Image: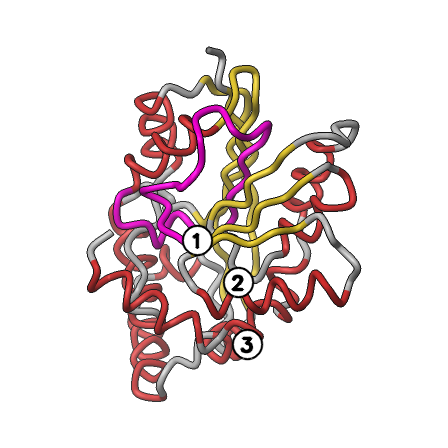
Amino acid sequence: MTSGHATLVTKQFGARADAYVESSVHAQGADLDQAAALLTGHNAARVLDLGCGGGHVSFRAAPLVGTVVAYDLSADMLAAVARTATQRGLANITTRQGRAEALPFADRDFDFVLSRYSAHHWHGFSQALAEAHRVLRPGGTALFMDTVSPGTALFDTYLQAVELIRDPSHIRDYATAEWLNALAAAGFTLKNVTARRVRLEFSSWVTRMATPAPQVTAIRALQGQMAEDVVNHFAIEADGSFTIDTAAIEVARES
């Protein structure tokens, strides 16, 4: 990640750390349930929460496993995660700061790598996936959960546009096919893909990122001018709320 983009990411999310810890959208979801099910029965496992954000994966994982390392670029976000972990009595969560593209961990250090709503901010997507593969032990499992592009050019253009207007640190929501190609290139073996749809309430979505009023107005204006098929796909509502495509992609490192 270039220093300029890293600075932008930390600026965007550092000041919003508590908002993300408290976000109901991030604190729940079928993908978190899926992650918990994956970890159940592995009470000695060592888990990496890659790009932990508000720490919701870490908080779900900690009661089920031996150790969780919450890893993020933002020191403020990590401080919020550490405070919440202490408040909840989750003593097996530790925090570590750094970039997804250069993990400060030994080869084969983790039994599981989990990442949720982080990859669309990575400057080096393929490099970060290669690093995730490197630190995962043979026989280990990784689960990547993120917003995905619908793939169609028209829908993709709309999605990337509103994401970037809301949050200038956004890089790209990748299509599922792009994910699968990149994961295979990194050395992972595909286990399964679970597609979901998630509704985003507009007011809380922009408030959580403290999106400036002119950008909020721009998003609403863009929504009002989109073709009917875009409106239908994203289920754009009168108040601006809309629905996104997500995927939880489970992969393994075989050797």
For the residues labelled 2 and 1, the Cα–Cα distance comes to: 35 Å
Magenta region includes residue 122: yes
Residue behind mark 3: 204
Image quadrant in which you'd find residue 183: top left
Q: Earlier in the sequence, mark 2 or mark 1?
A: 2
Residue at horizontal 30%, vertical 22%?
A: 185
Q: Position of residue 127 (x, y in %)?
A: 28, 36
Nearer mark to the viewer, of 2 and 3: 2
Q: Label 3 crowding class (10 Å Cα cut-off): few <14, some 14-19, many 20+?
A: some
For label 1, the SS is: helix
Q: Is residue 123 magenta?
A: yes
Q: Is residue 78 above or below residue 122?
A: below
30 and 155: which is toward the camera: 30
Which amino acid does the dot numbered 1 rest on?
Answer: His
Q: Secondary structure at mark 3?
A: helix
Mark 2 residue element: helix
The residue labelled by disc 1 is 233
Q: Which residues are magenta?
A: 98-124
Q: Residues within 10 Å of mark 1 (few under 14, many from 20)?
A: some
Task: Name the main secondary structure of what is drawn in magenta.
Answer: loop
Which amino acid does the dot numbered 3 rest on? Answer: Ser
- Mark 2 surroundings within 10 Å by alpha-carbon count, few (fewer than 14), some (14 through 19), many (20 or more): many
Q: Residue 226, located in which quarter of the rendered image? A: bottom left
* Marked residue nearer the N-terminal end (3 or 1): 3
C-alpha gap between disc 2 and disc 3: 22 Å
Q: Closer to the N terminus: mark 2 or mark 3? A: 2
For the residues bearing labels 2 and 1, Cβ distance under 8 angstroms? no
For residue 78, which numbered disc appears in the image? 2
